[in-house]
Image (tube, rainbow, N blue to C red):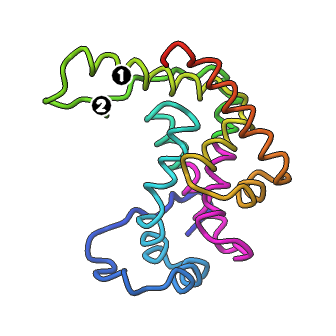
Amino acid sequence: MPDDAQAPVAGPGRWPDDAPLLEADLVARARAGDAAAFDVLVRRHRDRLYGVALRMTGDPEDAQDVVQDALEHAWRAVPRFRQDARLSTWLVRIVINRCRDLRRARPQAAVPPDDTLADAGTPLEAVVEGRGRQDAVVAAIARLPFDQRAALVLHTFDGRSQAEVARLLGTTESAVKVRIHRARRALLATLHDWG
């Protein structure tokens, strides 16, 4: 595929039963230029990448753009992927870098409301209060310094160990611990009124 081509889009029937395919085999095929193998890898990792991007950007559209850009970059770079880290780690690193690029281009991204709290059986007052609390948390995370936000999101929300976060962010484990601690302290200070 030429360098300016977009990452392949998963299509039905291309790999009817991708479950038994080992990730290492798929990576090897993708490195050799097999777009269908890359499609399978994209399907396996896209939701997790989107979750990281959404928590980093605070905006669903920005998160989609970040993931698409990251996957296009990954498709172009997969032949050079050394496999010294897990593929998911490599992809998350690309997403984090794209989030950093977005932040530099637009330092103050808007934080949209989240509709995930709506429930037909929940009283309106509880929904409004819950949305307000959730919006406050999303906004507070979006206001954290980028390095603190990245460490917090990767550790707390993406479930990565502090050692893995350190590798992803290119820093030490002790620096990650400090960033997470400062991020949590800042969130507590910002959100103290929500109790």
Crowding at dot 2, Cα within 10 Å, few <14 / some 14-19 / many 20+, comes out as some
Task: Write down the residue under mark 2.
Answer: 117
Identify the magenta region.
Answer: 69-98
Between residue 193 and residue 93, name the one nearer to us. 193
Task: Write down the residue under mark 1.
Answer: 131
Does 83 lie within the magenta span?
yes
The quarter holding residue 18 reads bottom left
Which secondary structure lies at badge 2? loop
Find residue 73 and report its horizontal and vertical position in percent. Answer: 62, 57
- Contact? badges 2 and 1 (CB < 8 Å): yes
Q: Is residue 34 above or below residue 141?
A: below
| Residue depicted at 31% across the width and 29% down the height | 115
Q: Is residue 163 above or below residue 40?
A: above
Crowding at dot 1, Cα within 10 Å, few <14 / some 14-19 / many 20+, comes out as some
Q: Amino acid at mark 2?
A: Leu
Q: Amino acid at mark 1?
A: Arg
The quarter holding residue 167 reads bottom right
How far apart in space, not on screen, are marks 2 and 1 (Cα)?
6 Å
Does 78 lie within the magenta span?
yes
Q: Is residue 97 above or below residue 29?
A: above
